[in-house]
Image (tube, helix red, strand yellow):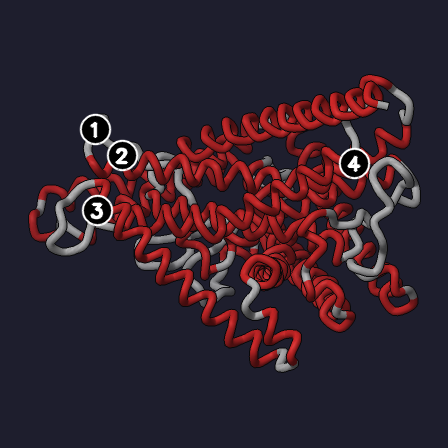
């Protein structure tokens, strides 16, 4: 018996060490990728070492850690689905025994723990540390800024805990709830993270439909559109004439001192717009036939198919919610990893679910930066401040943490939420889940209908040559971007 006990302890030890090594390697890859992404957009500072440089470097490391955790939250559910299907396909394969339920549960708990840590500790610390200068009368330096940061974090924690305490006391006024108000670890943190998850779900509900419709415009800007009843040579010739006219006006304004300032800045901006238009037209002219006539329709068809499948799956999930209680996110029990497949059509449906999850995540990010409220957080290459990077990391963390919850709530996947992700109280509310599904389906459909009707109308006007007329009250055409000096649309 003693030898058997030693063998079991050794197996548990080796399995835990193996899980730690796998988690470390996965996080190391995510951290390196996150660091490359942030340094690509971060504003380049001076090379000399000073106090602000040290503070920026510390904030950079914290933002990189947060972005890596966000990446882990995005890949968590797809990785779990893939692991489940692999274990079902190869149940007795020796080389995949490390891919077990203990590892998957550990990853879910680690991502949940690090999400809480980044959201409530690291990101507030990075922001306050970046904005701190030390208390008045104290000696300036890193220690003074750290002291001020911890004081601000303590006051913020008291404020948040007080708000949660009052809200909980108003919602649940029974004796059991009043006793749980004094339990910090088992009540406050899960309740607070549940509220953050609900806010993230609502943010995804706003961003994802907008992003699904915006994806067509983004891909249209990246790809070359087919040329239908257009003379690109004539348009390039007209653009050259406009560029020469603006260049002459700019040279003339520079010779007069009284015309400098905002007028010169406006001319430079218009000249940049004209040059961008000329570059786009030249790119369209040089593009090959298969790129214009084959690649663009295929990509648009893929986007339309992915969006349609997402809406249909949400509509089916609404029907399941009305007739089956197990369709609720908290209605099904944990079946374990590698026991049964949660996809009706096996590997094919699992692959489709994973593709839709990544598509929804990319669409939510595109929709997030497309909203006017969050346009100020749009990162720019080599010109993004650390404050903006902190805001971007927090926003992406909230979106990525809510992605598994949204995918399960909308019925994109039937995979049960593991770890602390399944402890959200609002997931068991039938009316919240049903309203969430209905709003997503309706808003996404309306955004797509509006997008395609406006696109068809613009293409018809362009084909008939009516786009040259003053059919719009706005001085800017979002598709062509043709502007004149006085705000009127130019005729090409």
Find the distance from the CA under tag 4 to the CA under tag 3: 46 Å
Q: Nearer the viewer, mark 2 or mark 4?
A: 4
Residue tagged 1: 49
Query: Does the CB distance between marks 2 and 1 fall below 8 Å?
Result: yes
Earlier residue among tags 2 and 3: 2
Residue 284 visible to an observer of this rendering = yes
Q: Nearer the viewer, mark 2 or mark 3?
A: 3
Give SS at disc 1. Answer: loop
Residue at horizontal 62 percent and vertical 82 percent from the top: 173
Check disc 4 and report its element: helix, strand or loop: helix
Say left or right for 472 vs 419: left
Q: Nearer the viewer, mark 3 or mark 1?
A: 3
For the residue carrying disc 2, how many other residues have a C-alpha within 10 Å: few (<14), some (14-19), or many (20+)? Answer: few
Q: Position of residue 142 (x, y in %)?
A: 23, 40
Report crowding for label 3: few under 14, some 14 to 19, many 20 or more residues within 10 A (C-alpha): some
Q: Residues within 10 Å of mark 4 (few under 14, many from 20)?
A: some
Q: Secondary structure at mark 2?
A: helix
Q: Looking at the image, do the residues carrying marks 2 and 3 touch, with CB atoms under 8 Å apart?
A: no
Q: Is residue 12 above or below residue 362?
A: above
Q: Nearer the observer, disc 1 or disc 4?
A: 4
The percent coordinates of residue 414 (x first, y second) are: 82, 50
Residue drawn at (82%, 56%), measured in percent from left and top? 312
């Amino acid at each position: 018996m003693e030898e058997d006990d030693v063998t079991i302890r050794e197996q548990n030890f080796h399995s835990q060490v193996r899980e730690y090594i796998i988690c470390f390697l996965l996080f190391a890859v995510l951290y390196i990728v996150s660091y490359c992404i942030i340094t690509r957009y971060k504003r380049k500072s001076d090379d000399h070492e000073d106090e602000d440089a040290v503070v920026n470097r510390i904030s950079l490391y914290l933002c990189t850690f947060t972005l890596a955790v966000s990446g882990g939250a995005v890949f968590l559910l797809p990785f779990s689905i893939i692991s489940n299907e692999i274990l079902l396909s190869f149940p007795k394969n020796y080389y995949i025994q490390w891919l077990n339920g203990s590892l998957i549960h550990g990853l879910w708990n680690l991502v949940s723990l690090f999400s809480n840590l980044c959201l409530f500790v690291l990101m507030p610390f990075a922001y306050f540390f970046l904005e701190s200068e030390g208390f008045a009368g104290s000696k300036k330096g890193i220690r003074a800024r750290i002291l001020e940061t911890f004081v601000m974090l303590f006051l913020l924690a008291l404020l948040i805990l007080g708000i949660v305490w009052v809200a909980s006391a108003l919602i649940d006024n029974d004796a059991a709830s009043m006793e749980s108000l004094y339990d910090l670890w088992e009540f406050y943190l899960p309740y607070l993270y549940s509220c953050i998850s609900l806010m993230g779900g609502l943010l995804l509900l706003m961003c994802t439909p907008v992003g699904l419709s915006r994806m067509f415009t983004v891909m249209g800007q990246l790809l070359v559109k087919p040329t239908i009843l257009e003379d690109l040579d004539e348009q390039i010739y007209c653009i050259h004439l406009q560029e020469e006219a603006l260049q002459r006006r700019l040279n003339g304004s520079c010779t007069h001192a009284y015309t400098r300032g905002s007028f010169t800045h406006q001319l430079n901006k218009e000249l940049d717009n004209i040059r961008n238009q000329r570059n786009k037209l030249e790119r369209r002219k040089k593009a090959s036939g298969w790129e214009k006539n084959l690649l663009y329709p295929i990509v648009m068809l893929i986007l339309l198919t992915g969006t349609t499948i997402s809406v249909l799956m949400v509509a089916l999930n609404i029907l399941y919610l009305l007739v089956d209680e197990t369709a609720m996110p908290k209605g099904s029990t944990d079946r374990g990893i590698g026991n049964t497949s949660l996809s009706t059509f096996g590997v094919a449906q699992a692959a489709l679910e994973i593709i839709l999850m990544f598509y929804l995540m990319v669409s939510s990010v595109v929709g997030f930066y497309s909203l006017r409220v969050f346009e100020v957080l749009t990162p720019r290459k080599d010109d993004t401040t650390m404050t903006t990077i902190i805001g971007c990391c927090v926003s992406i963390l909230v979106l990525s943490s809510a992605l598994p919850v949204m995918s399960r709530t909308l019925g994109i996947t039937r995979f049960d939420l593991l770890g602390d992700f399944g402890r959200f109280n609002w997931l068991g509310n039938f009316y919240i889940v049903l309203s969430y599904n209905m709003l997503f389906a309706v808003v996404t459909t309306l955004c797509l209908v509006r997008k395609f009707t406006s696109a068809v109308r613009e293409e018809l006007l362009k084909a008939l040559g009516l786009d040259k007329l003053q059919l719009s009250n706005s001085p800017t055409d979002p598709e062509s971007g043709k502007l004149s000096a006085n705000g009127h649309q130019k005729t090409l």
